[in-house]
Image (spheres, rainbow, N blue to C red):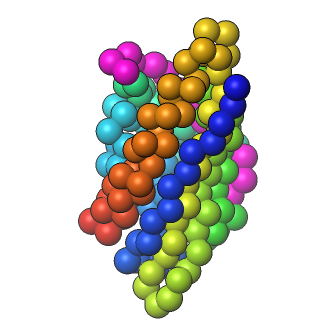
Amino acid sequence: MAGQFEATTEVDRPIDEVFAFLAAGTNDPRFSPRVQKITKNPEGPTAVGTVFTSTVKDAGMKTGRQFRITEFEAPHRIRWAEVSKNVVTADEGGYDLESTGEGTTRVRIFNVLEGHGIGKLLVGFALSAARKDADAFGRRIKAAVEAS
């Protein structure tokens, strides 16, 4: 069983600034408490093919994650796919950004979660937790971008 969660927030920053913050990829620990650390390969600007490697903590367990950027259209769209092999993965995810006025930007984030092996039994719990936290996740993105 696969499923999607998403969050939308309004950020009081111009679209180019919001896009740059999110595209950096290494800012995730500033708004996602589950991300313990994250690195980017190769160094330099994010582009299609860039891989982010992170250590995350979910339900008390640390796992390694790798995400490859699959689409990158500044300043409106970023897409990724998880390439690591975990019991629950984000097979597709992304940000959609839209300018909503002078100095404001609407940000939508989503992830499609998929269970593998025993993860097929766990993905429903992961989706439920992600959906429950979605609005707060959007608020954390807003706060992190606005504080940058």
Residue 112 position, x and y percent, is: 65, 39
The range drawn in magenta is 59-72
In the image, residue 40 sits, relative to residue 144, either above or below, namely above
The residue at 69%/31% (across/down) is 2
- Say which of 127 and 102 sits in front: 127
The residue at 65%/17% (across/down) is 120
> Quick check: can you spot residue 42?
no
In the image, residue 21 sits, relative to residue 66, either above or below, namely below
Pick the quarter of the image with the C terminus: bottom left
Residue 67 position, x and y percent, is: 60, 35
In the image, residue 105 sits, relative to residue 7, either above or below, namely below
Q: Please tell me whether the stretch drawn in magenta is mainly helix, strand or loop.
A: strand
User: Quadrant location of residue 86?
Assistant: top right
In the image, is 108 to the left or to the right of 79?
Answer: left
Pick the quarter of the image with the N terminus: top right
The residue at 38%/16% (across/down) is 61
Q: Is residue 4 magenta?
A: no
Q: Is residue 60 magenta?
A: yes
Residue 114 position, x and y percent, is: 66, 28
